[in-house]
Amino acid sequence: MTELIYLTDSYKKELTANVISVTPKGKMWEIVLDRTIFYPQGGGQSSDRGIINAASGTGQVKHVRLSGDTVIHECAITGSIAKDTKVALSLDWPTRYQHMRVHSAGHIVHEAVKLVAPSSIVPVKGEHGAKPYIEYEGSLTIDKKYQIEKEANIIVEKNLPLVTEFVSLEELMRRSPWVPAHLPKNKPLRILTIGNFAPIPDGGTQVAQASEVGPIIITNIENDETHVRVHYAIELVQPTPVDTEPQESSMTAAQLTGLLLDLQQDVLAQKLTLLESKNAFATLTKQIKLVPAADRQSVGVVVTQVKQTIEKMLAQTHTSSLVTHNSTWADVTMPGILPPEGHLHIVTQAISEITRIFERIGFTRVRHPEVDWDWYPFESLNMPPNHPARDEWETFFINTQIPISKSQKEKNSKFTKMVLTPHTSNGQVREMEKGHLPIRMINIAKCYRRQIDVSHVPMFHQFEGLYVDHEVSIAHLKGVLDYFVKQFFGPERKARIRPFHFQFTEPSFEVDISCGVCLGVGCKLCKSGWLELGGAGMVHPVVLRNGGVDPNVYSGFAFGWGIERTSMMKSGTKLDDIRLLYNNDLRFLEQF
Amino acid sequence: MNILVPDSWLRTFLKTKATPSQLKEYLSLCGPSIERIYDDSGEPVYDVEITTNRPDAMSVFGIAREASVILPQFSIAAELLYNPYLIKPIKASGDNKLLITTDAKLNPRWTSVVLGNVTVKDSPKWLQDWLTRTGIRPINTIVDITNYLMRAYGQPAHAFDYDAIAGHTMKLRASIKGEKLTTLDGKLHVLPGDDIVIEDGSGRLIDLCGIMGGENSAITPTTKNVVLFLQTYEPVHIRKTSMKLAHRTEAAGLFEKGVDSELVLPALMEGVRLAQEIAGANVASRLYDLYPKPFTPYAVTAKKTKIHSYMGIVLPDRDVKSILTNLGFTTSVTKGEITVRVPSFRRDVTLDVDIIEEIARIYGYQNIPSTLPNKAPPGNLPDPHLLWEETIKTRLRDWGYTELVTYSMISEKTMQTFSMDPKEAYKISNPLSDEWVYLRPQLFPTTITAAIQNLGYTKNLKVFELSMAYLYRPNDLPIEKSTLIVLWSGEKFLEAKGLANAICTLFGVDFDAAVAEKKPHMHSYYTQQSITVGDYGSLGVLNQALLDSLQVKIPMTRLYMNFDNLVRDARPTKQYIPVPNHPSSDEDLALVVPEQFEVGPLIAAMKAAHPLVRDVTLLDVHEQTRTLHVTYMDPKKTLTAYEILPVRQKLLALALNTFGATLKSN
């Protein structure tokens, strides 16, 4: 009789023992020890492997079997191992541990089956080897597999303990509602208890905690006339490298059949679209070659059956949906479902449009300060302090007294007074100061003037065009203005320039646009056929010089006017009060 | 400035067959703009706008002179009549003396004469009609003559009661601050100082020069002797006084622009002639004309190449010369240059470009071709801020938000409501109203103020503004900081968070990483239901105290984004990830979670749990259940249920063990 250490300590990996007998059998030797950690094949669990080391030689344990109450280790021996000597046993632990996990998984699956299955099924046996399953008398529908899987994994997730102990039969019968027949009555029984589930007789090795098993998959439920097998799988602890080309026999007929039936069920339940069903079926069909050649015929039957089911189902669905589309009454007068609708401010819309128009002729939009040194919107533009021309702009001043000594190091006297820029022309010298010629800019910014009435607001927007290059002419200015007017207002409109005066341009112009109603002939709306648009001119030599540009080498033109006015002239919105633009009333803004 | 010119008055100086509408059209194209023609009792009256640089045209004669040059360009004959520059001074003498002291710097030319035995009465009808039609109220013969001179020639004139001038002494000087003077209109002025005034022999001020005469020496119905007085003044002084006293008269407007010193004496002669004619006056003194530095014409030269380059065309020399000569410039042409001697009334012409303007406007801007620049464009890179602004605004519009644009200025009260320090803000020294005093240091106050006005009729407010805030810098210009504010009515925390996420994604900025920084809020505008988005902003439900102070009765949610920082960190280039050849598998996991459960970390952990997990999103929230949508994908193959299961088990184990979330049982 061999003492079975693994029954009480399944984690013992090494042990010393005495050799009882060594018997040759063919090329192998059969060794019997007084005690062992090697598990003999049985109860569905595979045999352990490992090494028996003696002083005089080493035995490779290839297989272990139980004969009566004696464990026989079948070994290949190098050197020699003698009777009545001490030997050291060492398990192939990874293999053993895998066996343990598979075995424990089997018990967990069994508990799950008991939770899910009708009580009429009776466990028969478990196979915990390479293709593990639990077999029952009775039958189970394949759709139970999800529930079983779920319940099994809950046990794993809860990490329930697996406890083995020796009890008497009476004890077992008291603790368990169901005890298999034919158990010996006169010796202690080893039982396994998972969490609070009922104990169950077991002679194998078990992991201590359910989580060691890892996720469990129910791969198939296989029924025959009287019995049902619940196939399951777990992850290997050290996954073997995935073969790039799956090998024949890497899948059993049962597995593939199960997957095909899964698909059939999904199709019938209309969980998949037409395309998904077809793709999934094609993928599974390809896997036939993974099934051992001998079993392929049986799988083929299932394939054909599933294919017909899918096609029939899809044909039905398709037809019925067509019928639905063709004959169902619908109220087509119901309003459509609108996409979300936001609105850009009119000024933003105009800015975008103006920017695009000038981009097409090489003018790039820039932005210069809204709050600026008085020098940029005035002095640099040939308007010294107290110049009468400043009256044209009702300017807001900023309440700051900059000590001259503390202001900017260079040009310090220029930077002492701050204003809210009353026009975008402050960008002219600022743009020139960048030092890149030629210049084609469109400067768009907020401007501020101290006035409010139906046609004036204290904050508004202007756009300012500036072109500085060699030999820039009035003809070019006219060309650009005509281009803009036709692009922005329409191809039938025209621009004209008339003499005007600004300190920072010479000559200076007032720009008119032909009336949109009479196209320049004169009508009730416009009186003269023309509407005033804004100002323009050839950049004054003083301004060029202030911007560091030599007026004897370069010339330029500039133009600029209000976005709001320009936009209102175009849109024909009949907006009679410019203040509406900045009341921010959504009932107004959402009209644009 | 605009003046009204009756047609009949204009035609005393201009002989032409041009119709009023022709005059209007052609003058507007090439010279002073005739904005409209009024009909006054059957007479056309022109409303003419004259630009500030052309005081020489701010008169009936000035308009006639322009017309005489312009009309022939349109093949309409026109001849200038009664040119005052041709009037010769009379020989004046008499016993009434004036003791005059003046200062040539303040008063480059002084002319005056005493007229005796005047009759102060109503003017004849023709004069009254002209004055009325030009917008001046007739008073009496003497005052009307002075107004006639101003309108006819653009030369302001004044008449004193000779007998009211103590000691017949007139001393022109700069005033001392605090001196007082009551003008003709009865207004008492306390002078700011350095104003040009005239003091009489008793030491009282009798004239606020260039602006308005004193009440104490005004013409009355009983006036017998008159000093007719025409001058020029140093323009800046006139302007300063007029501005400081806020006393803007037409005379001041003319003097500050500079009247022609050569026209002073002819205008005085014309005044004397009229006084004799309609007021029975006789010349009772010698002619006083103090003019130490008479005008000498100066030369201005323009290169022909520049003229042609500016106009974009080549004009024949004879055309150029003819235009300039007709305008009164003595013109000489050499091979490469045009040189003019500038007449006294056109002192606005000082540079070559001024000559170019004269040539071009008379030639006619309408005759210059229109052509787009044919040179290579600069090829500048666009400003990314501006591009991003447009992008974001357009996106927001398409996402259903409406843009507001608010004034940049805010009131003192708003500063207090939002706990902003006035010392850290720019204050307008001359505000238009109490509403607009400070430049907003943040965008939020104006946007929310505008937004809440709409709450009365909008249930589902979704608005934004992308504008500047003005950050204070001592002794320097503000930092103009682009800021985005989005506002919702109601508790829309998740909308705000989702929008911030979408905006960050658009910029290529890692939203999750930014949120994970957990920076403190800069302002205490929020409830606890709020987060910061790293350097890029913050979002959340606004707190009750703030809403109370704005008298808002419903919850509101805001998103604030520092637009500049987004632009700074923008990484909009998308990296190519190969398109998967294999379909993904998807499933929904309904998890029962503990109280006060934060789902964010769970999603993050699940996403990172296994390489086959491509995405995890929150599908549904119901009581203690969070339904997560999990996408499994392997780029190399189609996943089978067999392969997904262990991954799912791992996710569920993670949810259970780390987060206490269990799969909901059916």
Image: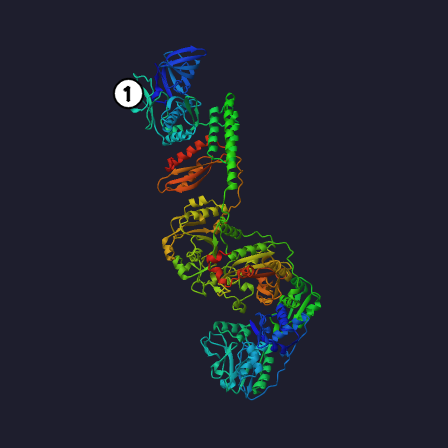
Q: Residues within 10 Å of mark 1 (few under 14, many from 20)?
A: few
For residue B37, side relative to residue B644 (left or right): right
Q: Position of residue B411 (x, y in %)?
A: 42, 61
**Total marks placed:** 1
Q: Position of residue A197 (x, y in %)?
A: 33, 27
Residue A188 in view: yes
Q: Position of residue B92 (x, y in %)?
A: 59, 86
Q: Give the colour scheme shown.
A: rainbow
* Amino acid type, mark 1: Glu
For residue B247, side relative to residue B37 (left or right): left
For the residue pair A48 and A548, the one nearer the viewer reads as A48
Disc 1 marks which residue? A170
Above or below, A423 relative to A222 = below
Residue A416 in view: no
User: Image quarter for residue B134?
Assistant: bottom right
> Which residue is drawn at the image coordinates 40% and 42% (left, top)?
B621
Q: Chain of mark 1?
A: A
- Which image quarter is the N terminus of chain A in? top left
Q: Position of residue B493 (x, y in %)?
A: 41, 48
